[in-house]
Image: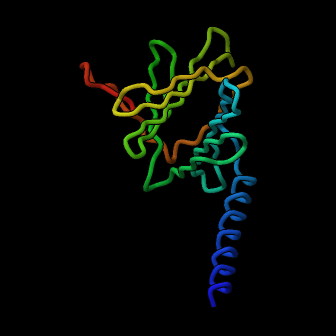
Amino acid sequence: MNSFFVFLVGVFFLIISTESISSEKNATEIISCSLPGKVSRKVSLYTNDKKEIIYIFKREGKVELRVLFNEGNKLKRFSDSEIGVVYYGFNLGGYSYVIDVITGAEEEEYSVVFDVKKNNKILQSNDCLPGAFVSNDIPNEYITDVTYIDGDGFNFP
């Protein structure tokens, strides 16, 4: 009986992981950022057939964090046109994850930065390695635009 239960649990997790992998294969990458360091790390945003947005953080090719943004859980965006930066971010368990897309002087020129904060204090801020990718076609269905509030208390996201 116990070995049959273990078998069923294993099959369940195999089906779940296979479905997750296949849904990522049908997804389109909209932002990609490889981070510097001895250990390979990559932050990506994808969109799927339903225009949902998927955040994935990988370390050494293994997914460590995956967050789905849809009608019930929207990704936040703050655009600062004065300095030419668009921030995409979300909060999860006291941590904030933010991808900064900084536009350059030339068309199609940009740089990308990845920040992790805890209690509004920056724990990590990395410029993405050359070759970061930002799509011109980022869907808006599951993004909430945040407006700036005057004062020292404004924190994104």
The front one of 133 and 35 is 35
- The location of residue 134, given as percent across then percent down, is 66, 29
**Could you tell me which residue is drawn at 34 percent across and 33 percent down?**
119
Asked if 4 appears above or below 122 in the picture, the reply is below
**Could you tell me which residue is drawn at 72 percent across and 20 percent down?**
130
Q: Which residue is at the far top?
A: 105
Q: Quadrant of residue 3?
A: bottom right
Asked if 29 appears above or below 5 in the picture, the reply is above
The answer, for residue 53, to whether it is visible in the render is no
Q: Which residue is at the far front?
A: 2
Q: Quadrant of residue 126?
A: top right
| Rendered-image quadrant of the C terminus | top left
**Could you tell me which residue is drawn at 62 percent across and 8 percent down?**
105
Q: Please name the colour scheme applied to the rendered image.
A: rainbow
- The location of residue 62, given as percent across then percent down, is 69, 47
**Could you tell me which residue is drawn at 73 percent across and 54 percent down?**
26
The front one of 37 and 106 is 37
- The location of residue 129, given as percent across then percent down, is 69, 22
The front one of 125 and 80 is 125
- The location of residue 103, given as percent across then percent down, is 59, 17
How many numbered marks are there?
Answer: 0
Is 6 left, or right, of 98 in this rendering?
A: right
